[in-house]
Image (cartoon, rainbow, N blue to C red):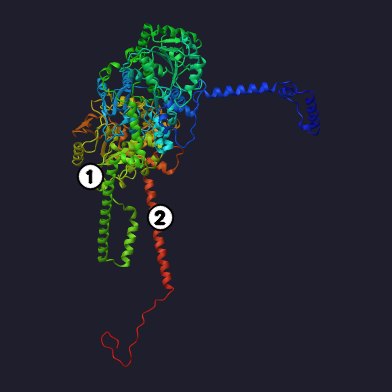
Amino acid sequence: MGSLESGIPAKREATAARWGRQHPFLQRNRSRLSRFFLFKKLNYIQLICTMCVFFFFVVLFQMFLPGLVVVDKSDKPPWRSKKEELLPPDLIVFKESGVFDFGEGVRFEPTKLLMKFRRDAAQTTSTSDGFNLTSSTTQRFGFRKPKLALVFAVLLADAQQMKMVTVSNALLEIGYAIEVYSLEDGPVHGVWQQMGVPVTILEAKHPSGCVIDWLSYDGVIVNSLEARSMFTCFMQEPFKSLPLVWVINEKTLAVRSRQYNSTGHTELLTDWKKIFSRASVVVFHDYLLPILYSEFDAGNFYVIPGSPQEAWKAKTLDFPRKDDIVISIVGSQFLYKGQWLEHALLLQALRPLFSGYNSESYHSDLKIIVLGGESASNYSVAIETISQNLTYPKDAVKHVSVAGNVDKILESSDLVIYGSFLEEQSFPEILMKAMALGKPIVAPDLLNIKKHVDDRVTGYLFPKKNLEILLQIVLEVITEGKISPLARNIGLMGKATVKNMMALATIEGYAVLLENILKLSSEVASPKDVQTVPPKLRESWSWHLFEALMNALPDNRTARSYEFIANVEGHWNHTSGEATKFGVVNDDSFVYEIWEDERYLQVINSKKRQEDEELKGRALQYHGTWEEVYKNAKRADRSKNDLHERDEGELLRTGQPLCIYEPYFGEGTWSFLHQHPLYRGVGMSGKGRRPRMDDIDASSRLPLFNNPYYRDSLGDFGAFFAISNKIDRLHKNSWIGFQSWRATARKESLSRIAENALLNAIKTRKHGDALYFWVRMDKDPRNPLQKPFWSFCDSINAGNCRFAYNETLKKMYSVKNMDSLPPMPEDGDTWSVMQSWALPTRSFLEFVMFSRMFVDSLDAQVYEEHHRTNRCYLSLTKDKHCYSRLLELLVNVWAYHSARRIVYIDPGTGVMQEQHIQKDRRGQMWVQWFEYTTLKTMDEDLAEEADSDRRVGHWIWPWTGEVVWRGSLEKERQRKNVEKEEKKKRSKDKLNRMRNRNSRQKVIGKYVKPPPENETVTGNSTL
């Protein structure tokens, strides 16, 4: 053996000393390791052998690790392979994003949503009495139930329908009102009707669902990916802020979306992301799905575990008899590197089952199947190596990949052992599959497993730190080469248990979620606690409602989902391959293009003929002198601001006594607006206006509505200010009306019969100066108890309607003490709601004059707090429509106390009935407060103050309309006189310049040749 001699270190020391003397700054002390190698005797051959053995075991260990996949560097995407298409999405996700050691980090926590829920709850409790006006307190009245809309793609009988039926039963029990909408009908239609839930099948020509007033619901729950078309409506105003829960149960989009970037479907991927971000909450039924859909996560993912899907699938299965015994070792749905060690420990614990057999002569019927890993990995080699090292008989242990084999393996198994020690967040889905099939299960005593499995009642549990008990359990289950009767009974008990497993958690999860995301207004009752639901409805799925539908032909939900995704992709694909698939559509478009070309040629020919006729007419007409042309040009220049082209709608409205304006905000309201000449739209925003319609842009008529705060706070009431501003330039009719698009959605808009009846009453002046309305307060869905005026107003304004009116009127009229409100009698008649009424135009301007001062006083007391925190004392929660509900009823107060007749017209029949007859109002009206002279004086005082610029700070009144008073009129007159004098002066100066120019140059006379002296002059000729 070679060793280091003692002389060599001395030589190195001398060399080192000489080097140190030459470079003293580089000299340093040697480490212990270097001194060990330099001064101690060491066997280098032994060191080399040790290192080789170490690296050999490292390489061997890495080779047998699961999840080690050979990367194909070819240009062909891996998902194009047919073999890899069979991989489940969870394996693909973890293969792409990396694997974990033992899975401890695999957890899903909806951090953003939970923080939002806690923040909203804290703000609700802490700011209920934190307004500037300490005398105002908010309260909930609870006159109606909270309303939910459930939207389905199709009403098929499946596990997801059963889940939503079960949840809906519980929600109905705690006080919700539910209505169902579906794109297609199905057999579950009768189940919903049996529950007393209204069902509406949306028409095929309106797949987007914008024919429904979704604002009448407090929240919407959309089920499945196939209801995607409904989001075209929910992503438009005014439905953008509506709380929306999207329940996704399919994995199909998660699988297909991973190839969108490579196939050029980036726009489709972006569109899906926009849809996911629109949902308030996206709900999944297990913790794997949010990881699969992580690419679409907008911070709104949420998991409510539980589904009867496995029990539903096992309901119709029948297993053939077999002689051999199969033990299946299954694991977590998440893939992590430590799984091979867990499987090795389990196989080591089960090795005594084969103690009587050797590896060469094995003919037993007992087999072990390890279910896990990927088909594309070398996990089978790892399992085979482990079984060989543990001296298992040949073919006794077999590995089967998860891809497409789970159901088949579980059906053929006699005993299922859960071999993962990972603490998952919910009960493992694969154990639910096994229990639903009636298989006895053996699992470690993990927290979420002990919660649902009773040891030796519905399954077997063993300590995860003591695998010897696992062997004892297996020996009890398998006796004399068969499954013991006790184990079979335990399997049946487990099957009965899993039938209703997780039902309670699902119901409670949805109840808690809705409680956190729904912002209920003050007239809506709070739902009861979910614990008040009877245990029969709370702890089991609604199997009894689906018994008659269980024997129906099963619908392949997965295939249907893939077909839907393929159809969506087809609409975004413009390749030639897809052109054949949609040949019918392309043929129609080709015919349409031919028709468009023909129509274009006809238009060109007609224009050419018209131009030729005009040219002929111009050639024959008298052009006049230059002086006449100059005068006509001057006249046209003076009147150019008064000229405008009149479109077809304006021409049709000319001569009508009435024009009804329909305020709207956003494209979601278009289907509720009329196109009849009697109506005209008022777009409250520059965006979202109807194309090719003569709608009015409120923001261009009144710059106040360029501010989103006042556009939202005032709502439809802001249209009154926009129309009244310089009304002579817009409205030429003697009467004016308004109608909310929501009245049309509720089918309470004027019919043709009612329109004719109203026009006849206006023409004949049947009721004189009257307020006609057609949406009644006593039939409003917000007022099911038919409360009187002030009680209803309090209920929709958090109990502060009377307080707001009192404070606003005191500030408006500068009154220090006001003990009472304007009386609104309870005489059996009703009032107007939803801003749907008609008035004489002159009376409308008087009402706007009163409203501008009322809104100014209201804004002065609410603006600071509401603009800063988005909260006001007229709402229980954050609400950007603070003023709108209070102003909705203002026209009733003004009309009643200004002594105008109030007439209700039935929107269907046109029958008219006067409300609150004038002679019965005597002694109750505050006429002196609402008469025109009083309001006009107050208006002029405000206009004078605005014109003088004396007020400092926030003041809304000058921005709500024209500022007119006697002083402003005098200023306008003086301004016009000054402009007129300046114009005269400029004309006079111009004439003087022309005269001075003429004086400097003499007029050149006409030269006349004199006649010859010898010739005579005859007539007028010069000879």
Q: In which quarter of the image is the C terminus?
A: bottom left
In the picture as drawn, the residue positioned furthest to the bottom comes out as: 1014
Q: Is residue 419 left or right of residue 633?
A: right
Q: Which of 927 and 556 is in front in this view?
A: 556
Query: Disc 2 residue type?
Result: Val
Q: Quadrant of the N terminus?
A: top right
Residue 154 coordinates in the image, percent (x, y) = 29, 28
Disc 1 to disc 2, C-alpha distance: 40 Å
The mark nearer the N terminus, 1 or 2, is 1
Residue 686 coordinates in the image, percent (x, y) = 37, 42
Is there any visible trace of residue 541 in the rendered image? yes
**On screen, residue 822 above or below 763:** above
Helix, strand or loop under label 2: helix
Q: Which of 162 and 922 is in front in this view?
A: 162
Q: Mark 1 points at which residue?
A: 656
Is there any visible trace of residue 502 in the rendered image? no
Tag 2: Cα neighbours inside 10 Å, few (<14), some, or many (≥20)? Answer: few
Q: In this view, does 13 lie to the left or right of 586?
A: right
Residue 677 coordinates in the image, percent (x, y) = 24, 43
Residue 163 coordinates in the image, percent (x, y) = 33, 20
Mark carried by residue 465? none
Tag 1: Cα neighbours inside 10 Å, few (<14), some, or many (≥20)? Answer: some
Count up the numbered dots. 2
**On screen, residue 772 above or below 984:** above
Q: Which of pointers 1 and 2 indicates the residue nearer the eye?
A: 1
Q: Residue 193 falls in which quadrant of the image?
A: top left
Q: In this view, does 556 lie to the left or right of 912?
A: right
Helix, strand or loop under label 1: loop
Q: Mark 2 points at which residue?
A: 978
Query: Disc 1 residue type?
Result: Gln
